[in-house]
């Protein structure tokens, strides 16, 4: 777990992730992303949107409301079946998930190892909100999954776009769950983001299995493309009794976190469960049917956490994040060798301003070059550009690679092209 402590400390110190409402003692299960963290998280979402929506002709995007008519959650089955098994300690009345044996043992230790628990009861995870000005206020829910917004708009999308089955609807957005035991940093939060694709197909067993397998592979390969270590990833099939209420088939993508193998994306065969419950169907040249849905549901916060953990490297004194350049918060940093030499600062500022037009770039003129490299390494900046005295003579700069620490000299007008090439 030592690595987790380091990641949590680095996140706070460098502005990746802070505890939510920290000045008031925090608030269990809520986290805030700092200036560096919001960039990493946005880059993950941008990469996902680019690969799932822009690069495919059969997927469109959507952004639906967080609070919906409560009937949605009744029809979707979430008010009845969306819960975790909960037990209560008979001594102190604290409640825990009954499937977390480690947590239960730890708690029993607080009562000299003598644990007495109530029968497990299902605890609904939906977060209630009260709306309106007159009493009684209207009860609604913060969405427990972003998915239902897609289903209830299925007809709108079909009627307003030229989509034809098979096609997908993608969405990224916040979801809320009244988790019994939030923990492991951002891993189990009460507010989190999901990035989901609902892919609609004809109701056909073979087609369903084929599409399910296709998206499983696509999603695993996506994490590999963005640099996650292959050996740290695996699929885990859900047995029928472990599947969510809507799933005919379900497989998780898990990462070997310091706290054990942990799910961060689910691929689900939802069949016609949702569209049927909402009374929706699809018409195609006189043929009417209820489509089946294959879903890929990833957690943005869990992906952010696992990209961070996976990228973390220590080499002697040196700490760096080997983030994929597309995900790195800054693409480059620009330094004048000396902060008190006007000509160096002027030239470096010119380069900084011109790169800024295309990339998010950091500026640093504090301390010595070694410290600036170390500082950028720690937040994963792939390239550092330094303007030195030779730059003034021959119009070249040094560009240093985060992973190899090797420096090359290149012409100022080649810097943008260099970054472009490396980004692919
Ligand atoms: N629409 C399907 C669905 O919501 P899920 O397996 O319940 O499926 C999908 O959730 C993903 O959402 C998970 O794999 C995880 O990455 C993320 N997620 C779920 N609960 C979370 C929580 N409490 N904190 C952070 N992320 C969570």
Image (spheres, rainbow, N blue to C red):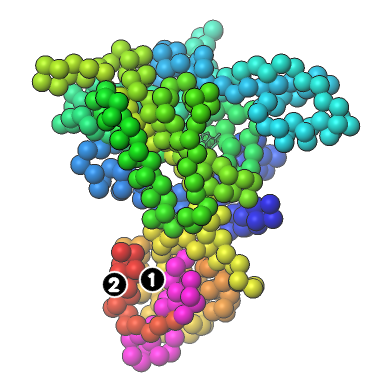
Q: Is residue 57 left or right of residue 25?
A: left
Q: Nearer the viewer, residue 286 or 92?
A: 286
Query: Would residue 212 be seen by someone viewing this image from the given angle?
Result: yes
Q: Badge 1: few (under 14), some or many (20 or more) residues near its Cα, within 10 Å?
A: many
Specify whether residue 215 is painted magenta. Answer: no
Q: Which residues are magenta?
A: 380-406
Could you tell me how far apart the alpha carbons at marks 2 and 1 are, in whole angstroms? 14 Å
Q: Secondary structure at mark 1?
A: helix
For disc 1, the marked residue is 352
Question: Where does residue 110 sit, x and y in percent of width and height?
Answer: 84, 33
For disc 2, the marked residue is 417
Q: Quadrant of residue 122?
A: top right
Question: Where does residue 26 sit, x and y in percent of width and height?
Answer: 66, 39
Residue at the top extreme?
A: 136
Residue at the right extreme?
A: 112
Mark before the other along the chain sequence, 2 or 1 = 1
Q: Is residue 176 above or below residue 226?
A: above
Seen at 22% across and 32% down, the residue is 166
Q: Is residue 150 above or below residue 355?
A: above
Q: Quadrant of residue 210?
A: top left
Specify whether residue 405 is painted magenta. Answer: yes
Q: Is residue 411 above or below residue 187?
A: below
Q: Secondary structure at mark 2?
A: helix
């Amino acid at each position: 777990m030592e690595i987790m402590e380091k990641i949590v400390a680095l996140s706070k110190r460098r502005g990746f992730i802070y505890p939510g409402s920290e000045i008031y003692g925090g608030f269990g299960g809520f986290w805030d992303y700092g200036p560096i963290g919001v960039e990493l998280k946005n880059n993950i979402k941008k990469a996902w949107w680019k690969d799932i929506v822009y690069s495919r002709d059969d997927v469109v995007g959507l952004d639906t409301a967080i609070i919906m008519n409560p009937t949605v959650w009744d029809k979707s089955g979430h008010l009845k079946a969306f819960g975790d098994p909960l037990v209560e300690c008979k001594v102190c009345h604290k409640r825990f998930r009954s499937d977390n044996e480690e947590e239960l043992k730890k708690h029993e230790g607080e009562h000299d190892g003598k644990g007495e628990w109530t029968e497990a009861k299902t605890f609904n995870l939906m977060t209630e909100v009260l709306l309106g000005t007159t009493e009684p206020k209207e009860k609604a829910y913060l969405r427990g999954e972003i998915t239902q917004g897609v289903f209830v708009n299925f007809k709108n999308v079909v009627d307003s776009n030229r989509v034809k089955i098979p096609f997908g609807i993608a969405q990224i957005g916040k979801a809320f769950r009244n988790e019994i035991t939030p923990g492991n940093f951002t891993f189990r939060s009460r507010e989190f983001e999901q990035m989901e694709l609902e892919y609609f197909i004809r109701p056909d067993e073979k087609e369903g299995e084929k599409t399910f397998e296709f998206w499983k592979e696509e999603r695993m390969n996506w994490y590999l493309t963005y640099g996650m270590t292959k050996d740290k990833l695996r699929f885990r099939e859900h047995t029928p009794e472990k599947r969510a209420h809507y799933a005919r088939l379900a497989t998780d993508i898990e990462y070997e976190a310091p706290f054990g193998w942990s799910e961060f994306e689910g691929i689900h065969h939802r069949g016609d469960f949702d569209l049927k419950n909402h009374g929706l169907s699809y018409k195609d040249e006189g043929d009417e049917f209820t489509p089946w849905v294959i879903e890929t549901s990833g957690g943005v916060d869990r992906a952010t956490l696992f990209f961070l953990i996976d990228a973390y490297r220590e080499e002697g004194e040196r700490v760096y994040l080997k983030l994929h350049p597309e995900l790195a918060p800054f693409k480059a940093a620009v330094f004048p060798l000396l902060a008190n030499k006007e000509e160096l600062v002027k030239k470096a500022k010119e380069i900084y301003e011109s790169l800024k037009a295309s990339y998010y770039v950091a500026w640093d003129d504090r301390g010595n070059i070694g410290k600036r490299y170390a500082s950028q390494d720690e937040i994963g900046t792939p390239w550092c550009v330094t303007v030195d005295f030779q730059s003034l003579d021959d119009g070249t700069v040094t560009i240093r690679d985060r992973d190899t620490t090797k420096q090359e000299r290149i012409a100022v007008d080649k810097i943008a092209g260099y970054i472009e090439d490396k980004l692919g």
